[in-house]
Amino acid sequence: MRTVKWCAQMSLGVPAIDEAHKAFVDEMARLAEANTEQLGAGVAALIALMERDFREEEALMEKIAFPGLRAHREQHTCALEGLKQAQAYIGAGEPAVGHATIAQLTRWFLIHLSTMDLALAVALEMAGEHLHPPPNVFLRAQLSRMLHMRL
């Protein structure tokens, strides 16, 4: 299974989000290589991680009255529901579904990062939230194309 490694170009300039994304990417890479026993526990931990990170990200959106909050939250919900369904399959002895879901979730994340999360980072910058450094939209567009070509 092809994995993605965290790189500086994935940074949005929002420390809390960047740290959460790095942990997510690292966990996805670990799960891509997990055996059947590790997969079940790993997916449960990933669900907990994503629920916490999504709550924190959505709180930032609420703080600045982000106009894309509803659509962004729906994306988060769909990703979590897909992972929870995979968790049920893993529990029923079908780990291949879990591995396929991890691969798909990795693709989803790269698209989500380069579209919805980038828009949030720009909105946070416009709202005067502290960013290190602010995202470069042109470079992010190039990164998005590059990442899509790799998958």
Image: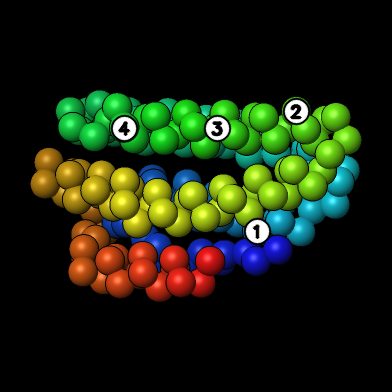
Going by the numbered disc 4, the residue's amino acid type is Ala
Residue 88 disc label:
2
Decide if residue 81 is in sight here. yes
SS at mark 3 in the image? helix
Instruction: Work out whether mark 3 precedes mark 2 in sequence or the reverse, and give the earlier one.
Output: 3
Instruction: Work out whether mark 4 precedes mark 2 in sequence or the reverse, and give the earlier one.
Output: 4
C-alpha separation, residue under disc 3 versus residue under disc 1 = 17 Å
Left or right: residue 130 versus residue 87 is left
Tell me if label 3 and label 2 are in contact, CB under 8 Å. Answer: no
Image quarter of residue 40 = top right
Instruction: Work out whether mark 3 precedes mark 1 in sequence or the reverse, and give the earlier one.
Output: 1
Going by the numbered disc 3, the residue's amino acid type is Leu
Q: Dot 4: few (<14), some (14–19), or many (≥20) neighbours within 10 Å?
A: few
Left or right: residue 32 versus residue 122 is right
The residue singled out by tag 3 in the image is 80
C-alpha separation, residue under disc 3 versus residue under disc 2 = 13 Å
Going by the numbered disc 2, the residue's amino acid type is Ala
Q: Residue at x 52, y 55 (%)?
A: 107
Residue 29: x and y in percent read: 65, 58
SS at mark 1 in the image? helix
Q: Is residue 134 above or below residue 54?
A: below
Front-most of residues 131 and 148: 148
Tell me if label 2 and label 1 are in contact, CB under 8 Å. Answer: no
C-alpha separation, residue under disc 2 versus residue under disc 1 = 21 Å
Q: Residue at x 59, y 50 (%)?
A: 104
Tell me if label 3 and label 1 are in contact, CB under 8 Å. Answer: no
Q: Dot 1: few (<14), some (14–19), or many (≥20) neighbours within 10 Å?
A: many
The residue singled out by tag 4 in the image is 71
Residue 37: x and y in percent read: 88, 43
Instruction: Work out whether mark 2 precedes mark 1 in sequence or the reverse, and give the earlier one.
Output: 1
Residue 72: x and y in percent read: 34, 35
